[in-house]
Amino acid sequence: MSTITIKVLSRNAYPKKFDHALQVVTSDNKLFELFLPEDQTHKLEQGKFYKLVGCNAFIVKSTNKHAFKLTHKTRIFYTAPFPIAQEVEDSFFHAKKVTIPEAVALPKDTRVSMRGVIEAVSPVKEGPSYSLQSLDLVDNTRNKKITVNLWGRNSEVQIPPSGTEVTVENLLTDSYQDRVVLKATQETTFLTEEAPAATAKTVTFVAFIEDSNNITFLDDLDIEYYSTAELLCNTLAIQQPAEAHQHLPLTVNIELQTVTGKNTITSMAKTCDSSDNNDESPK
């Protein structure tokens, strides 16, 4: 049996099996999950400080993390507040931002935040004992994607529309259907990023590569521009991106948005290219 002094940070949005779980910070400034029977949940309030005498310490098998569990024999005392380092609470309420590859490599139940673009939002799925809404988040290259699952009450959260650039705070790494995903917590928030104004310009592309339906162009100064394969094919009226090499050098009118130094083409219209010139009859 263990004795710990805690502050209750928040409740999980949904119970785990037959127990409810609280997120707590201990007097030695460590974050833990505290499991307790449903009929005990009213005894611990969010934001309050307690000394718990006679709780069980154990390791959660799925995450290999230490946790505590209340029993009906645990004695619960109110106690005075203790100092908590600002960075400890910040790591909980404003979890560190990671990239999609970094998130995929992290252990299960690691708390993270992520910046990206909402690619798609699914309808809410409901069953006898669950509700689930999912969204796909992509990075600015559009090459990396990860699913965010919102279970239970989290499925009622107002999600920004597809195409919105957001920072999603306070998610947990998880696995679902043999994939690494992220799941929402009670503290998950969507912070929308104001879209930069589109810039119109005429540019000549001298080279390009295709990767996973994404196109990277180079201009004559070796500046990179990014587009989708669909936009390129529609602009040139071709079936496959590889056919575009016949149009190089390609001069186009484009509109683009520049975010963190990345030039993303949002629209494109052809002006003239080498194939047009080659088709002209000599006079």
Image (spheres, rainbow, N blue to C red):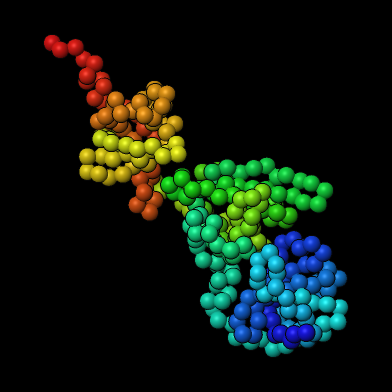
Residue 278 seen anywhere in this rendered image of the structure: yes
Residue 258 on image: x %, y %: 36, 48
Residue at image location 76% in from the left, 72% down from the top: 35
Q: Quadrant of the N terminus?
A: bottom right
| Residue 123 vertical placement versus 242 (above, below) | below
Residue 154 on image: x %, y %: 69, 55
Residue 159 seen anywhere in this rendered image of the structure: no
| Residue 232 vertical placement versus 124 (above, below) | above
Residue 264 on image: x %, y %: 38, 43
Residue at image location 70% in from the left, 67% down from the top: 61
Q: Quadrant of residue 19?
A: bottom right
| Residue 19 vertical placement versus 220 (above, below) | below
Residue at image location 64% in from the left, 50% down from the top: 178
Count of numbered marks: 0
**Left or right side of 172 for 56:** right
**Left or right side of 48 for 98:** left
Residue 201 on image: x %, y %: 29, 38
Residue at image location 78% in from the left, 81% down from the top: 55
Q: Quadrant of residue 124?
A: top right
Q: Residue furthest left?
A: 283
**Left or right side of 105 for 109:** right
Q: Quadrant of the C terminus?
A: top left
